[in-house]
Amino acid sequence: MAQEKVLEINQLKTYFHTKRGIGKVVDGIDLTLHKGETLGIVGESGCGKSMTSLSVLQLVPDPGKIVEGSVRLNNEELVGKSEKQMRNIRGNQISMIFQEPMTSLNPVISVGEQIAETIREHQGLNRKQAFQKSIEMLKLVGIPSPEKRAKQEPFQLSGGMRQRVMIAMALACNPEVLIADEPTTALDVTIQSQILKLMKNLQKKLKMGIIFITHDLGVVAETCDRVAVMYAGEIVEYSTTEELFRHPKHPYTKGLLQSLPKLYEDQEELQAMEGSIPSPFKEHQGCKFTDRCPIAEDSCHQIHPDLKMSSDHSYQVRCLFYQEEKELTKGMSSV
Amino acid sequence: MLAFITKRLAQTIPVIFGITLVVFLIMQMVPGDSAQVLAGEGASKETIENLRHNLGLDRPLYVQYFDSIAGLFQGDLGISAKSHQPVINEITTRLPISVELAFYSTLITIILGMTAGIISAVRPYSVSDMSVMVVALLGISFPSFWLGLILMYIFSVELQWFPVSGWDSVKHMILPAFTLGASGAAIVARMTRSSMLEVVRQDYIRTARAKGIRGYLVIYKHALRNALIPVITVVGLQFGALLGGTVLIESVFAINGLGRLIVESIRMRDIPMVQGGILVASLVFVIVNLFVDILYRFFNRRIDLN
């Protein structure tokens, strides 16, 4: 894998200042995306994965704000750029695909025009050329009779087709980074695998880095090179996909993997993780996972663990009890 | 689209028949004998009976009804009891004035209302938003005849910018049109604002921003077109309602429109004229509604007639 960095996120903090207090939705994230690589961000709903990606594009909704940290695209700092400068990056160098293909396309504008306007905005083509290019893009993402489809409005297309349109739109300007926020969650399984395959092929063709946000570990296993597991606005484990699935280290990751239904074992009932993610408004002194952690001790309530890098730099874990080469056994014998 | 228009046109036929029936029946229930009114005070019983027979008022109701429907198709709305002229003649001179007034009012409603609504929605809860909404609230709360009198006092009597009454030039039209359009503008402003605020929260607006589309394009191309869908309906209905609802303003500014004609005719017990006036006003309302539906359909092509 070419180890050329495209996107570097350092100590990114996005807080929501409200009357209820400060919501630390993204609380010090470090991520690196290399060229042509797929990086997964996994976690439950509300763990801050979508806000991380919106922060990269500086599209965090009010009253959210990036309070600290840096986002660098090809070594160029994005945080602090003007709205106009960011506009030149959005849809051009960094694109995004959203979860809901049903609602993410404008219902009253033809899909061809929705793709074409991005092209006009960033590449300065005229109306006709841009529309022609949008037809090519539709062809590229495998939409049959693209000339006809381009003139149709989103409601005339199926869910899978709409997501293809979203992908065509995102890739229209050859972005270096594609952020896919749960792109397949709203689709049924067969369409899901088609879309994933399509994204893989296009990634190879266009050599872009993909940040894949999902809560579906199956999708992660299928698509990602490396994975960051997020919990309550922080990364708790960060490693290659293989390492993560073979040797999960953080108790949260273990819990996530355990809660997957197993196909080849007799399972009386599904293993669910107890409790839910803490509110971003809650103040933590210690580890944010303590309330749900099966191995938490008193010290966990006091000390906030750092994200520790392994000695061979292959993974990172945020847990007081984790020690290299020594699997966590305490209270988790079944794992 | 053509199939839609045909279907929608077909739907108006029973509505129109319904209107004629209701208007006819109501007129039958109004106390007072039109033959007697026509014959004038002090007419002999025989004269009245003769007149009744000549007008066909002694026939069974259903015969009278179908007779009037047959007349309607030939553009015959009967003879005015007051002027003894065909009702249709009077109406065709009065209707254009009301339509003109309603048209200019609607124009003011749209321009003022939508602009104000957009200004408000772009920066919600800002000073500009608050001021626009306070003005809009006042606009809804003021009764139109009162607003008309106040405007007339300020601009016609004191400042003498506009004539007090009549309907000859653009100058004559400004005050009545503004008076009539003001409350509509206030409603449209509030609707545009709330509709825009709703729309800018939609996923596709986030998509547009994520594509790097310019701010004003996001507002005018992506948000406004969706936000206007409910507003169009209100504007259309407003326009229809204006045609019948201009009565007060036509009286305040002494404009000889359809509304004023109907009111005068009611006072004079000129039953055929009232009947004809209401019928025409309702017909126009139905037609306007038809256009609104077609426009609505154009803006929002997802709507199926089913």
Image (cartoon, rainbow, N blue to C red):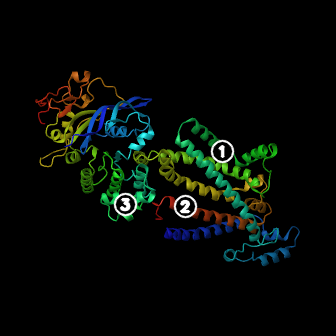
Q: Mark 2, chain letter?
A: B
Asked if badge 3 and badge 1 are on a common chain, one would say: no
Residue A50 image position (x, y, % from top left): 33, 40
Q: Label 1 lies in what chain?
A: B
Quadrant placement of the N terminus of chain A: top left
Residue A332: x %, y % from top left: 14, 32
Q: Are marks 2 and 1 on the same chain?
A: yes
The answer for which chain carries disc 3 is A
Decide: is A274 above or below A197. Answer: above
The residue that disc 1 covers is: B139
Going from N to C along the chain, the mark reached first, 2 or 1, is 1
Q: CA distance from mark 3 to mark 1?
A: 49 Å
- Which quadrant of the view contains residue A126? bottom left
Local packing at callout 2 (Cα closer than 10 Å; few below 14, some 14-19, many 20+) is some
Foreground: disc 3 or disc 1: 3
Disc 1 marks a residue whose amino acid type is Gly
Instruction: State the residue at coordinates (70%, 50%).
Output: B178
Question: Which residue is tagged 3?
Answer: A135
Is residue B130 visible to the viewer in this orientation of the structure? yes
Q: Left or right of B106: which side holds A116?
A: left
Q: Residues within 10 Å of mark 1 (few under 14, many from 20)?
A: many
Query: Disc 3 to disc 2, how far (Cα)?
Result: 29 Å
* Residue A278 percent coordinates (x, y): 31, 32
- Residue designated by label 2: B295
